[in-house]
Image: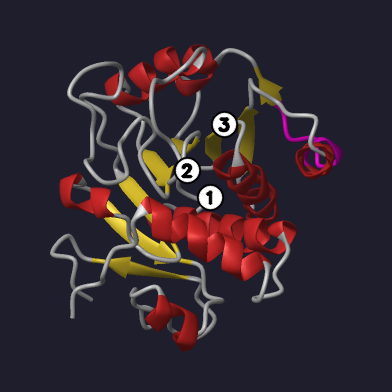
Amino acid sequence: MALRTLGPKAAAALDEELMSSGAFSIDQLMELAGLSVSQAMYALSPPSRSPRVLVACGPGNNGGDGLVAARHLHHFGYKPTMYFPKQTKNELYQRLRTQLEQLKVPFTDDFVSAIGKTDWVIDAIFGFSFSGEVREPFPAVIKALAESKVPVLAVDAPSSWNIDDGPPDDGPGKDYNPDALISLTAPKPLVKWFKGKHYVGGRFVGKEIADKYEFDIPPYEGSDQVVEVPLTGKL
């Protein structure tokens, strides 16, 4: 059975319901998402093979997922470096940064230089709510992701892609197709244009909610938080 996709409006409505009648807090959802991202990274390449991971975080929830993932990666044995140029004064993000600073995880302002010194990049810049123009300083970052030979794991969406229509026709993301993608809760329509390894993560939604929003819960095994989905879209 092919996994059904979840469009941007449905994904936003699902998040709202999870934080209202679902009784989840934003902290919980971000923690679960970040854990899924870190497990996908481990499945792709454990720290014994590629210890250095550069995590690029945007200013929204996708960036928060990246901050959480970096904490887990540190405890998994990786050596993460953070690129977080548009930091918010939101208390949650400040706490997530403080947690990384306490672990001595370094932050960098020079993404282009840092990408040349890493084994993998996690693209946690823009997620399912992205639309419109890519604003500074991210055009150069996305251009570097597209041109670099360093493999990239994108969180929920390759940054700059339209959730429904895939990669842009022009601009820095035109030729950007990352090596791996971790879809959170359910794949988004853009997966039709994706060519790399695809994982689904977010093992916390019940069947009733999945049926209401018309998406599928993949068959997670054991204690796994992620499931690899073949390029055919079938399990």
Tell me the distance, in whole angstroms, between the alpha carbons under discs 1 and 2. 5 Å
Check the image and report above or below for 194 versus 81. below
Asked if residue 17 is among those painted magenta in the image, a careful observer would answer no
Q: Do the residues under discs 1 and 2 have CB atoms within 8 angstroms?
A: yes
Q: Do the residues under discs 3 and 2 have CB atoms within 8 angstroms?
A: no
Q: Residue at x 36, y 30 (%)?
A: 160
Describe the element under mark 2 as helix, strand or loop: loop
Q: Nearer the viewer, mark 3 or mark 2?
A: 3
Three-letter amino acid code of the residue under disc 3? Gly
Tell me the distance, in whole angstroms, between the alpha carbons under discs 3 and 1. 24 Å
Question: Could you tell me residue 136's position as x and y percent?
Answer: 50, 12
Question: Could you tell me residue 75's position as x and y percent?
Answer: 70, 55
Three-letter amino acid code of the residue under disc 1? Pro
Check the image and report above or below for 192 versus 125. below
Question: Could you tell me residue 68's position as x and y percent?
Answer: 67, 50
Q: Which residue is mark 1?
A: 47
Three-letter amino acid code of the residue under disc 2? Ser
| Residue 17: image tag | none
Q: Which residue is mark 2?
A: 50
Q: Nearest the camera: 2 or 79?
A: 2
